[in-house]
Image (cartoon, rainbow, N blue to C red):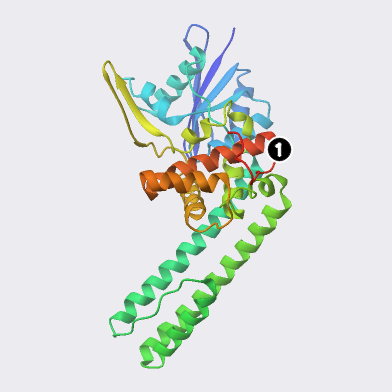
């Protein structure tokens, strides 16, 4: 008899339910929240399910990789879509959710999600660490400015990385006017130096990664695309064959307009903003760079500037961001560099 299993995962334990072809519950229980614990639970009961599904969540990536390595037919599914099915059940509990997931596995009524490779997650962690360091540095600088304004001290702005030392010099000068400010300045200057050095280390590591990776080197031939954008895109997509059409990456990143159609009513709204917000922001910055900063002529820049003249900068930047994403996926799949004399086919 064929069996199907559903796992409802929490931080400490996993609720497991196994059903047969007719939907009857064969076994229920809990196991430790780790791949070995789940595999041991099935082994102790001599059960070999045809399909095991669990929802996307905090531990889903780690559990999925571990269960696949142990030979279990595990599939991670979209938690948002599974919730719509599970919410129809009368009672809400971990065991009830596990049974509902098992029934979804039996009916094959679910949407699997892609589990990125460990290398992709390492890149995302590196990019995310750099972003966090920059946020901490900006928060620190903003706090210092706010504190000093109460004493009538207004610090000049920072537009380039080389001016960070000037910011610390201004803070040190402010500390000379008051013993309390001196104590504050000493502590904040040390923290600011540490954050700046850490950010510089992240930048150096990311530049080295982008130069050593043939995929990111190819993506950086596109106007406006640098190490951060190329590495973030490569880490997020992971496998370009996930998309049968390169144009689908625009919807994946939330850069296509929403549509509502019913009967005679049919309208398109703003972009959906689905998917990774950080990647969408990086693409918007790349598009802004193409329109305003890149001096060298290209078909992409010409198209973006003409669109900005007709529809305004923001709409043109969003459309250019989508076009850059499609171009990156196109070059990745075709294995060619961007041709500055004519636009790559997307």
Q: Residues within 10 Å of mark 1 (few under 14, many from 20)?
A: few
Point 59% across, 10% down: residue: 2
| Residue 107 versus residue 204 in the image, above or below | above
Is residue 33 visible in the rendered image? The answer is: no
Horizontal and vertical percent position of residue 10: 46, 37
Horizontal and vertical percent position of residue 280: 47, 45
Point 42% across, 86% down: residue: 183
Q: Nearer the viewer, residue 9 or 320?
A: 320
| Residue 63 versus residue 301 in the image, above or below | above
Q: Nearer the viewer, residue 83 or 327?
A: 327
Quarter in which the C terminus is drawn: top right
| Residue 8 versus residue 22 in the image, above or below | below
Image quadrant in which you'd find residue 228: bottom right
Q: Circle 1 — which element? A: loop
Horizontal and vertical percent position of residue 139: 41, 67
Point 62% across, 66% down: residue: 201
| Residue 27 versus residue 169 in the image, above or below | above
Horizontal and vertical percent position of residue 308: 41, 47
Q: Nearer the viewer, residue 214 or 76?
A: 214
Point 66% across, 47% down: residue: 216
Is residue 248 visible in the rendered image? The answer is: yes
Residue denoted by label 1: 335
Image quadrant in which you'd find residue 202: bottom right
């Amino acid at each position: 008899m064929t069996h199907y299993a559903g796992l409802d995962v929490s931080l400490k334990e996993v609720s497991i339910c196994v059903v047969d072809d007719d939907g009857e519950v064969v076994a229920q229980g809990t196991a430790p929240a780790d791949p070995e614990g789940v595999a041991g639970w099935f082994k102790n009961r001599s059960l070999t399910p045809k399909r095991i599904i669990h929802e996307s969540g905090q531990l889903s990536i780690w559990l999925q990789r571990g269960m696949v390595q142990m030979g279990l037919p595990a599939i991670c599914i979209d938690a948002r879509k599974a919730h719509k099915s599970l919410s129809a059940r009368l009672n809400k509990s971990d065991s009830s959710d596990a049974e509902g997931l098992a029934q979804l596995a039996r009916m094959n009524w679910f949407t699997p999600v892609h589990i990125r490779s460990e290398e992709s997650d390492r890149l995302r962690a590196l990019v995310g660490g750099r972003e966090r360091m920059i946020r901490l540095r900006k928060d620190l600088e903003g706090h210092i400015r706010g504190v000093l304004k109460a004493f009538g001290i207004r610090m000049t702005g920072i537009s380039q990385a080389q001016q960070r030392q000037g910011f610390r010099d201004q803070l040190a000068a402010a500390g000379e006017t008051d013993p309390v400010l001196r104590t504050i300045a000493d502590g904040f200057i040390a923290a600011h130096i540490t954050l700046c050095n850490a950010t510089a280390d992240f930048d150096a590591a990311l530049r080295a990664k982008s130069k050593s990776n043939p995929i990111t080197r190819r993506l950086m031939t596109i106007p406006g695309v640098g190490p951060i954008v190329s590495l973030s895109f490569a880490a997020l997509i992971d496998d370009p064959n996930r998309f049968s059409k390169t144009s689908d990456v625009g919807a994946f990143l939330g850069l296509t307009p929403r549509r509502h159609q019913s009967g005679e009513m049919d309208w398109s709204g703003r972009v959906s903003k689905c998917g990774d917000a950080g990647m969408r922001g990086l693409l918007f910055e790349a598009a802004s760079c193409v329109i305003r900063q890149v001096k060298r002529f290209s078909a992409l820049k010409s198209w973006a500037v003409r669109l900005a003249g007709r529809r305004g900068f923001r709409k043109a930047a969003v459309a250019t961001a989508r076009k850059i994403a499609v171009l990156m996926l196109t070059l990745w799949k075709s294995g060619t560099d961007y041709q500055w004399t004519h636009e790559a086919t997307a």
